[in-house]
Amino acid sequence: MIIIGGGASGLMCASTAGQRGRRVLVLDSSNKVGKKILMSGGGRCNFTNLFVTPENYLSANPHFCISALNRYTQWDFIALVEKHRIAYHERKHGELFCDDSAKDILNLLLNECERGLVTIKTQCDIQSIQTIDTVTPPTNNARFKLETNLGQFSAESLVVASGGLSIPTMGATGFGYLIARQFGHHVLPTRAGLVPFMFSDSFKAISERLSGLALEVNLSHDNTTFTENILFTHRGLSGPAALQLSNYWSLGESIHINLFPEHDMDTWLKQQKQQHPKSLLRTLLSEKLAKSLVLELQTLLWPDHADTAMAHIPDVVLERIANNLNTWSQKPSGTEGYRTAEVTLGGVDTTELSSKTMESKKQKGLFFIGEVMDVTGWLGGFNFQWAWSCGHAAGMFV
């Protein structure tokens, strides 16, 4: 069997199949495998999450991921990590990271591949893929023939684990989608996911002035809300909450920032008016928010009352300010796109794949795993867990 792509899902599939006794060849176009693993989690690899559920995944076919996630769980991968004596720790929301380096996870996968006698070839550019019965009589059960810069290869099974379009500087291309279309598969529209928001209006200038400031908020869009940090940048908003929400946002839509998730600010401001009648509003808010942000908000929301004591600010003005503090609405001009996106939304239509084996329903022996498929996880280790689960599912059957 041949696996196209030496990322997380490809190496997981390779080690699983190899240890079942299959002869496995991994072909990767870059100069070394697992590049995205090495850069993930700030170099510490958020390799899974303690609280994995199907609800943590986006897909046009939402039930597709259930089978694979149930058959190879986060606990299975954690057991593998512990078997390799990799030290790890839990951060918020059940995120698990290596104590030392993401290299530990890549080395785990490479060691498991070595146990399965897997062959890995890098800097391999695939020029064409054909089914053998269309060019020559089948031999040795081979079904696929690949022409590459390293020569010709043939195999009974072909697994496409070539990833999506995110972070093209790491070698990402749309090659997997071309293969899918070649064999008659529908590819759902793709877009950047887990990606920072950009702005082109007055909020961009505010973001530039506040660049580097992080704070925990409720960030929402329609019925989806994430309570996490946002980070102001020179282009707009980043941070976990922004990245998470980007998966649910479409161009032209607004997002809503609740700067005080734990307070009804209408009630709180009126209490402050009674308890601190001589104080300025910016003084009271600066006890809860960075002074730089409070000054920006003052310019926006209460410039005419900047130096007015609380006792003299009309309740109707406080109500308007409170509404903005709890629902500060902004309209992004876009996202930073694939350049900085952690994942690709959309991809190979999973209704045309087996949820148990990841095999194509259109071409026997053809499998799709990982980011090339229309399954996208939340930030926090969910995409790696999908790579382990779907890679294992295919590896047990291929």
Image: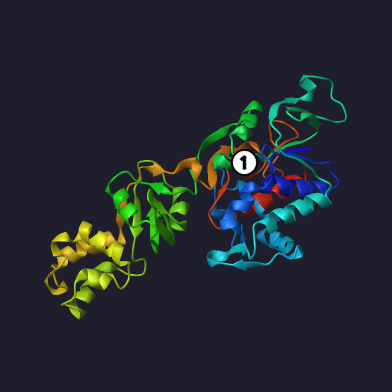
Q: Is residue 72 above or below residue 140?
A: below
Residue 175 on image: x %, y %:
62, 33
User: Which element carries disc 1, helix, strand or loop?
Assistant: loop
Q: Residue furthest top?
A: 135
Please say which color scheme the image uses: rainbow
Q: Is residue 156 above or below residue 8?
A: above
Q: Which of the 4 quarters of the picture holds residue 10? A: top right
Q: Is residue 252 above or below residue 255?
A: above
Q: Nearer the viewer, residue 314 or 243?
A: 243
Residue 375 on image: x %, y %:
58, 45
Residue 240 on image: x %, y %:
47, 57
Left or right, residue 98 beside residue 117: left
Q: Residue at x 44, y 62 (%)?
A: 228
Q: Which residue position holds label 1?
A: 163
- Quarter containing the C terminus: top right
- Quarter containing the N terminus: top right
Q: Which of the 4 quarters of the picture holds residue 150? A: top right
Left or right, residue 277 beside residue 113: left
Query: As shown in the figure, which amino acid type bears the numbered disc 1?
Result: Gly
Q: Residue furthest left?
A: 312
Q: Residue at x 44, y 57 (%)?
A: 241
Q: Residue furthest bottom?
A: 275
Q: How many marks?
A: 1
Q: Nearer the viewer, residue 135 or 280?
A: 280
Left or right, residue 307 beside residue 187: left
Q: Which of the 4 quarters of the picture holds residue 167? A: top right
